[in-house]
Image (cartoon, helix red, strand yellow):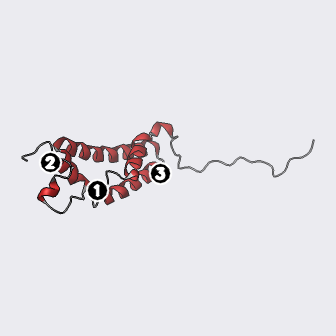
Amino acid sequence: MDHPLGLGLFEIDKIFPEPIHNIWISSFLNYGWLAGFAWTLLMILSVQQAWYNWKRSGDELFLLILFCWLSVMSCAMLHQAERWRFLWLFTGMLWGLNYRNFMPVSRQAPALEEQPLYREAA
């Protein structure tokens, strides 16, 4: 509370010898209140974005990207992940994919047209 702009990168190591591994807590401690709330907002809006895209298109690709992103995020809550390529890759994919680029998925089986097995020579 005494340092609203954060303690500064790795300054917490001078007070506590064990480094902060949780990326969410680290964003508050190292970078300040604004960065901590921005990180929290990024997490909430990312889930909302993926869920909204899935509901609008019905394509399971959005759920796959969301679950892949959540698996990387769950690891980031245990260990610092600012430099993890896959964290930012899946975050970019989550925000970059748009439901407008995907056709709505129909749950009906496509109708098969009657076609002859062979063609007669004319």
- Tell which tag, 2 or 1, sits nearer the viewer: 2
Label 2 Cα crowd, 10 Å radius (few <14 / some 14-19 / many 20+): some
The residue that mark 2 highlights is: 7
- In percent of width and height, residue 91 lies at 38, 46
* Upstream in sequence: badge 2 or badge 1: 2
Residue furthest front in the image? 14
Residue furthest right in the image? 122
Quadrant housing residue 78: bottom left
Q: In the image shown, does 86 or 14 lie closer to the viewer?
A: 14
Instruction: State the CA–CA distance, disc 2 to disc 3.
Output: 42 Å
Which residue occupies 11% across, 58% down? 15
Instruction: State the CA–CA distance, disc 1 to disc 3.
Output: 29 Å
Placement of 105 over or under 23, stated as above or below:
above
Residue type pointed to by label 3? Glu
- In percent of width and height, residue 34 lies at 19, 41
Q: In the image shown, does 67 or 58 lie closer to the viewer?
A: 67
Residue furthest top in the image? 100
Residue furthest bottom in the image? 18
The residue that mark 3 highlights is: 60
Which residue occupies 37% across, 58% down? 71
Answer left or right for 28 relative to 121.
left
- In percent of width and height, residue 48 lies at 33, 45
Q: Secondary structure at mark 3?
A: helix
Residue type pointed to by label 1? Gln
Cβ atoms under marks 1 and 3 closer than 8 Å: no
Placement of 97 over or under 87, stated as above or below:
above
Residue type pointed to by label 2? Leu
Q: Which mark is residue 80?
A: 1
Q: Secondary structure at mark 1?
A: loop
Quadrant housing residue 55: top left
